[in-house]
Image (cartoon, rainbow, N blue to C red):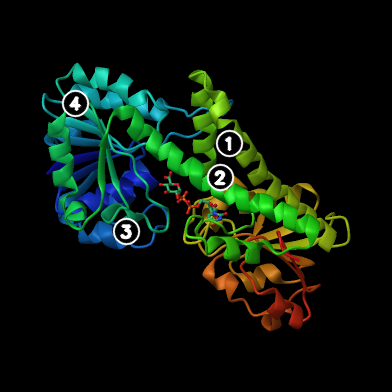
Amino acid sequence: MRISVIGCGYLGAVHAASMAKLGHDVVGIDVDPARVETLARGIAPFFEPGLSELLVEARDRLRFSVDMGAVRDADLHFIAVGTPQQPDSNAADLRYVEAAIDGLLPHLSAGDLVVGKSTVPVGTAARLAERVATTGARLAWNPEFLREGFAINDTLSPDRLVYGIAPGDEAAVTVLDEVYAGAIKGGTPRIVTDYATAELVKVAANAFLATKISFINAMAEIAEATGADVTQLADAIGHDPRIGRRFLNAGLGFGGGCLPKDIRGFMARAEELGVDQALSFLSEVDAINLRRRSRMVDLTRESVGGSLEGKNIAVFGLAFKPDSDDVRDSPALDVAMHLLDEGAHVVATDPKAIETARSKCPGLDYAPDAATAARDADAIVVVTEWAQYKTLDPHGLAPLVAARVIIDGRNCLDPAVWRAAGWHYRALGRP
Ligand code: UGA
C-alpha cells in the first residue's frame, strides 16, 4: 500500500519504518528539516533500540520530507503528531493535530483514508471526520499502544488492534486489515468500534496503568510509616492473577511523554463533558506520583545529615525509564533539579539521556559514566533503573565516594549486598 505518516516523532518515525518493513511504500512528513534529514540518512533522531537498523533495512520503500505535497502519491495517511499538555491547563494541546489536518486537506483525494494514531480527547475524531469528508476522503481512529524502548516490536506485533470507524465504513476496516495483515494472521485481536470508544480505549489504558503504579506507590507510603517492605508486598499480591505483578514496581513513579499528560488531559475532557467526578480519583493518582519525587529529595536530605547545601550528590539516571533517552516529565531529572535547587552540587549521568537532559537543564553538571559521577559524592541517588546501575559493584564504588550513602529510587538494588559492603542504603517503601 502507499502510505504517508504525518509527524515523525517517537510514534511516527517508528510507525513509518515499521510500515515500510511490512512491505508498504511509505513517506514520512515532519516540519523539522533536521529530523527529516537525519531519518533520511537512516539514523534514528532519538534512542530507540533497533530503529536505525530498521530505517536502513527498509530504505528502498521509505522516504522522508518536509513537503506535505509528498503525500499525494499515498492513499492512506496516518496522523502521528504529538498532543502535549497545554502549558497553562491540564488539557491536551491539539494544535499539531489541527495543523496536520490543515496541511493534509488540500492533498487528499476522494477515497483516501486518513487514520488518526495520536492520543486525542474523546470527540476529536468525529469533529475531524467532518473536515476530512469535505474532500471525499474518510477518517478512522486507530490508537497506538507502543512503549518506548519496545516500540518496534509493539508496532509489528501489537497486543491488540483497535479501529474506530464511522458508522458502516466497512471499507476502512478492509484497508486497515490489509495494513496489519501480518499481525492479524498471527492472531492479534482486532476490535472495531465507533470513534469515541477507540479514543477512550487509549486514555483508559494509560489511566489504568498510571493508577496501578500509584496504587503501589501509595502502599509504599504506608510501608514507610510502618516499617513494611513494599517490594515484598508487590510480589505477594502480584501472585494473584487478577492483580498481576507487572506495573507494580514501587519507586519514583511514572513520567514520560504519555502517562502524566494523558491522565491530566482525560480529567480535563471529563470536566468539559460534565462527568469530572468519574475521574476525580486520577487527580489523587497524579498527586501520589508527584509526592514520590519529593519523598526522594527528603530521603536524600536526611541521608546527608539534614541539609543538601554544598553536598555532592551523584544522580544515576536522567531518562524517564531505562532504554530511552526521553526526559519529558522525567522523575529522575525532576529530582536532580530539586536537589540542585536546595543547594547541592549535582553531578548527573545516564547511559543515553545526557544530551536530551542537557538541552532542557543546562544548569546541571553531567558526567559520562557512573564512576565519574560518583567521585567525592556525599550520596548517590539511583533514579532510573538502567541495567548497568542494577549491577553496580558496591565495593568498586566505595573508594571513589566521600561517603558510602546510596538512595535507591527504583528499588532496583539488593539492600543486603550494599549494606554488607558498608553502605548506608535507603529506598522508597522499604526499610
Ligand atoms: C506508556 C504505555 O505503557 C504505552 O502502552 C502507551 O502506548 C504509551 O505510554 C503512550 O501513550 O504512547 P511509555 O510512556 O513508553 O508507555 O512507558 P511505560 O513503560 O508505560 O512507563 C511509564 C512510566 O511508568 C515510566 O516512568 C516508568 O518508570 C514508570 N513505571 C512503570 C513505574 O514507576 N512502575 C512500574 O511498575 C512500571
Q: Are marks 2 and 1 in contact (CB under 8 Å)?
A: yes
Q: Amino acid at mark 2?
A: Thr
Q: Position of residue 355 (x, y in %)?
A: 53, 55
- 1 and 3 marks in contact (CB < 8 Å): no
Of callouts 3 and 2, the N-terminal one:
3
Which amino acid, mark 3? Asn
Mark 4 or mark 1: whose residue is earlier in sequence: 4
Residue mark closest to the camera, 1 vs 3: 1
Q: Amino acid at mark 1?
A: Leu
Question: The residue under label 4 is which amino acid type?
Answer: Arg
Q: Residues within 10 Å of mark 2 (few under 14, many from 20)?
A: many
The C terminus lies in quadrant: bottom right
**The residue at label 4 has a CB less than 8 Å from ligand 1:** no
| Mark 3 residue's CB less than 8 Å from ligand 1 | no
Numbered disc 4: secondary structure: strand
Q: Taking the image as drawn, is residue 152 in sight?
A: yes
Q: Quadrant of residue 413?
A: bottom right
Q: At x 49% / y 31%, what residue is drawn?
A: 266
The answer to the question of whether label 3 and label 4 lie on touching residues, with beta carbons closer than 8 A, is no
